[in-house]
Amino acid sequence: MQFLKAAIALAFALRTSGVYAQDKAVFAHFIPQVGNVQSFQESDWAQNIQLAQQAGIDGFALNIGGENIDTSTYTQPQLDNAYNAAQGTGFKLFISFDYAANPSFDIPTVSGLINTYKGKDAQYDYGTRPMASTFEGPGNAGDWSTIKSNTGAFFCPDYTSEKGQASYFANADCALSWDVWPVGANGTAAPTQSFEPSISVLTCSTDMTDSIDTAWQSFLGSKPYMMGISPWFYSNLPSLGKTWTWRGKELFNERWQAAQQLQPQLVEIITWNDFGESHYIGPLNAAEEYPGSSAWVDGMPHDAYRLLLPAYIAAYKGTNGSSTHYAEDLVYAHKINPAANQGDCSAGDVVGNAPYQAPVSAAAVSTDAIDVYLLVNSPADLSVSIGGGAAQPVGTANVAGVNYFSVPTNGATGAVAYTVTRNGDAIMSFTGATISGDCSAAGGQINFNAITGSYSESGASSRK
């Protein structure tokens, strides 16, 4: 009996201190602001939730904010729709307050929204406490002592701009990092990634490393770490001063491999539907696109990334095993235009790296290569040809699960054909998207976004 009492007391202490043993969970950041999907019906939320669950995602972080937000008529109806659609499905939700979009979030508004949804079936709880997060907002960090007192929230902010500054994290039970894109010119060694108080001095290597993640874990100690994972980044919105790209080659694979190795308590995919920054994995929806982004988003689906998630997530959670059988798929991702200026194709004002990161030419960051992900159960060989040329051997997929290959295009254009063989017999053979040196349809602007597509062992091909 004394042992039982001690065990109960320890469990209670761990829960109330925020150090709570809990199953790992993977979320996708639903952005732009929930209010921007004001035309959504509950059925639209249900469809997105179903797609996310099929990919093994446990829930959405619901980003809310925006100028002149009216939570009662603009955002709250969509939060209601989301929570109602998720009820009874096992899919979980929590609110992410976007202070960058709405710096005027005050204590009563934030507390009221958390309290409204914290008892819902679909609310994600860390331990027994409702999760709440932010996109930035370190200037309001002091508010969260009162907000937590008002709501009992488990607070996991993204204060990436002030990482390493303990004073901003005094009220945090957890932290989310948006340091998910590499900085530096392609093929040129850049300074190693550093954990500094200001994002303005952040540097990292050409390929994404996990050094920033290990720094976060060390900084947080026993507190949970929510690791960000993103597949891509490109934006060309001069009105917002956002005209840059970061290197996307191999990024999705690198981040999932890091998650498997570092075992963060939580993962957040950045994002489900931010079309303006090209890091969406959800279905294309013109109604959700930021004005002006259609030039590089339309006809550029990223759905195929989701085919990889069940295997990646199972490896991260440790739920895969020797008896796991995968539906064999090939997934590709690449740009449709070479990165270098040629003919009537130009990068325009787009550069590589953000303005605070010593920008270089976009071509120096953006690699002309095809990311190929081969999901197999037993060894298989991959070959690729471009523009009708002879098929070139790429390599052998030896791992049961996701195998990644980078295929340089070397300036070649034309349709890309893929062949996968096993023991000399073709098990997949199909033609994917085309790489083109003609940018006239986009006014001469190189599209630095990725297009994805897939082919399954059943013979189904999809440019998604």
Image (cartoon, rainbow, N blue to C red):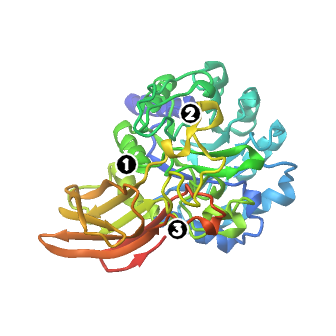
Q: Is residue 397 visible?
A: yes
Question: Is 200 rendered above or below residue 233?
Answer: above
Q: What element carries label 2?
A: loop
Label 2 sits on residue = 174
Side of 352 relative to 95 (left or right): left
Q: Residue at x 66, y 63 (%)?
A: 443
Quick one: label 1, few (<14), some, or many (20+) residues within 10 Å? some
Spatial CA span between label 1 and label 2: 19 Å
Rendered location of residue 129, percent (x, y):
61, 41
Question: Is 247 rendered above or below residue 70?
Answer: above
**Amino acid bearing label 2:** Cys
Q: Which of marks 3 and 1 is in front?
A: 3
Q: Nearer the viewer, residue 301 or 260?
A: 301
Label 3 sits on residue = 51
Give whichever of discs 3 and 2 has the lower sequence position: 3
Q: Which residue is at the far front?
A: 343
